[in-house]
Image (tube, rainbow, N blue to C red):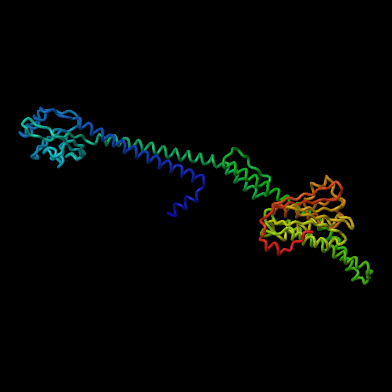
């Protein structure tokens, strides 16, 4: 069994469809042909039986045949046609008049003796042909009841059925061959879009040409598959372009701190090689610059690792976490980076479903921007009410034409290019908030500064015992 199955599975799809179509038609034609053959034979046999029942001899003919049979003389009655007449006496004696004698059966004797009203059966004549026999009782002139058997050869039916059999075989063969050819044509026509799709996939595999598109016709499953392929290649092309742009932007951003770091290290190395000491103040400034550049490189590499993950991938398992608690931790870090700034906070409890470490990183990035652009001894306002977090600074603000680009990777406004940073912070913020199901926007208030608004959907509140353990300070 495994051999034919393996062979069938190894055939091309076009051949399998044609073979299945031909097989299905062959089974259907065979079933219809057999049904037709049996129904026709049954109908012909019923008509033959009806014709035998309609052959009735009159009393005088039966009397004459009975007397001739008893005396052993020729029948005084002549019969035309292919049927045979047989007189069966109750004693078992019989006389046959017709083309071929037929042996008497027990059923025929039972009719002659008055035990059965009639008998209908098939028997074989002396010439070897099968005969259909109908026996009925008939009184003779001398008060004796005899059985009259009327028989006709079944060859009449067999000849017709033989002709019908050859006709059915011929029609079935033509039908199966035609179905196979039609199935092959339908398979070729139906699979043509699949062939085009296969050619397109092979072309993309060989050339990496993601601009390849398949013409879409209709609204069937093949059309849906073609649209899906086109959408996939378009998405891959966008992803590759974004990857190339990310690499180019990362190389550009890494070049500046690396160049500066290399220059400072070469100055230190040259000082050691030549023995010419660098003034203490200059050396301290040089080492501070090296440290700052290393810190900037580490931050940039961390940001690149964060953005290197696919957009659909989660950095970690999502948990129900207190946004207000994570925000307090981010505020503590922001105060260390801007000790001269004043932070006004108003935090109401709010729980969200997010990854804790990623959420805190996003909040730190938002607060870092506020610290970076706040004027000396300025104020940063932080409020959290019903899932809406607002961080407001009073710095130079953002120009209206720059607002659409603030969440682009590596984008930095002209006023911020002299400040530390890679231009990836707000991109990470937008990505993290979107993964948590929220939104983030930046606006420029009329009285100056920048306002960042994060809206995060709420999650089920933990039990009171957990809330109490958090030690919330609403200030």
Considering depth in this image, is 232 or 475 the residue closer to the camera? 475
Residue at figure coordinates x 42%, y 37% from the top left: 175
Place of residue 118 in the rendered image (x, y in percent of width and height, measured from the top left): 17, 36
Considering depth in this image, is 354 or 120 the residue closer to the camera? 354
Q: In the image, is 253 to the left or to the right of 80?
A: right
Q: In the image, is 333 to the left or to the right of 131?
A: right
Q: In the image, is 234 to the left or to the right of 7?
A: right
Place of residue 383 in the rendered image (x, y in percent of width and height, measured from the top left): 79, 54
Residue at figure coordinates x 62%, y 48% from the top left: 202
Q: In this picture, is 322 found above or below 167?
A: below
Residue at figure coordinates x 51%, y 44% from the top left: 14
Considering depth in this image, is 166 or 446 the residue closer to the camera? 446
Place of residue 399 in the rendered image (x, y in percent of width and height, measured from the top left): 85, 47
Kindly tell me whether residue 40 is visible in this rendering.
yes
Q: In this picture, is 41 found above or below 387?
A: above
Place of residue 92 in the rendered image (x, y in percent of width and height, measured from the top left): 9, 40
Quadrant in which the N terminus appears: bottom left
Kindly tell me whether residue 243 is visible in this rendering.
no
Quarter of the image where one finds residue 329: bottom right
Quarter of the image where one finds residue 379: bottom right
């Amino acid at each position: 069994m495994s051999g034919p199955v393996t062979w069938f599975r190894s055939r091309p799809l076009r051949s399998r469809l044609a073979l299945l179509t031909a097989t299905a038609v062959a089974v259907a034609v065979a079933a219809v042909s057999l049904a037709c053959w049996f129904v026709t034979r049954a109908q012909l046999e019923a008509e033959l039986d009806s014709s035998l029942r309609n052959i009735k001899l009159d009393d005088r003919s039966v009397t004459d045949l009975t007397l001739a049979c008893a005396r052993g003389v020729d029948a005084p009655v002549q019969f035309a046609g292919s049927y045979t007449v047989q007189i069966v006496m109750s004693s078992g004696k019989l006389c046959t008049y017709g083309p071929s004698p037929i042996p008497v059966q027990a059923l025929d004797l039972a009719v002659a003796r008055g035990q059965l009203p009639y008998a209908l059966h098939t028997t074989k004549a002396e010439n070897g042909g099968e005969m259909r026999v109908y026996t009925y009782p008939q009184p003779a002139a001398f008060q004796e009841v005899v059985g009259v058997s009327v028989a006709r050869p079944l060859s009449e039916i067999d000849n017709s059925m033989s002709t019908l059999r050859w006709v059915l075989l011929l029609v079935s063969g033509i039908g199966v061959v035609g179905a196979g050819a039609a199935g092959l044509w339908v398979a070729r026509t139906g699979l043509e879009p699949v062939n085009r799709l296969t050619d397109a996939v092979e072309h993309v595999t060989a050339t990496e040409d993601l601009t390849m598109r398949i013409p879409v016709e209709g609204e069937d499953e093949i059309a849906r598959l073609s649209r899906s392929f086109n959408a996939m290649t378009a998405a891959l092309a966008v992803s590759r372009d974004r990857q190339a742009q990310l690499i180019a932007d990362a190389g550009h951003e890494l070049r500046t701190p690396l160049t500066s770091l290399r220059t400072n290290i070469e100055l230190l190395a040259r000082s050691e090689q030549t023995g010419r000491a660098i003034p203490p103040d200059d050396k301290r400034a040089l080492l501070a610059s090296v440290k700052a550049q290393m810190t900037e490189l580490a931050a940039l590499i961390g940001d690149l690792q964060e953005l290197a993950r696919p957009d659909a991938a989660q950095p970690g398992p999502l948990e129900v976490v207190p946004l207000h608690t994570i925000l307090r931790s981010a505020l503590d870090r922001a105060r260390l980076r801007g000790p001269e700034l004043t932070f006004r906070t108003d935090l109401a409890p709010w729980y969200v479903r997010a990854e804790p470490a990623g959420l805190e990183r996003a909040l730190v990035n938002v607060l870092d921007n506020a610290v970076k652009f706040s004027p000396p001894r300025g104020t940063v306002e932080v409020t959290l009410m019903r899932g809406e977090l607002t961080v407001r600074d009073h710095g130079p603000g953002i120009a209206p034409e720059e607002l659409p680009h603030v969440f682009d990777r590596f984008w930095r406004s002209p006023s911020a290019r002299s400040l530390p940073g890679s231009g990836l912070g707000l991109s990470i913020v937008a990505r993290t908030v979107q993964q948590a199901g929220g939104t983030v926007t930046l606006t420029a208030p009329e009285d100056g500064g920048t306002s960042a608004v994060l809206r995060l959907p709420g999650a089920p509140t933990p039990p009171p015992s957990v809330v109490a353990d958090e030690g919330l300070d609403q200030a």
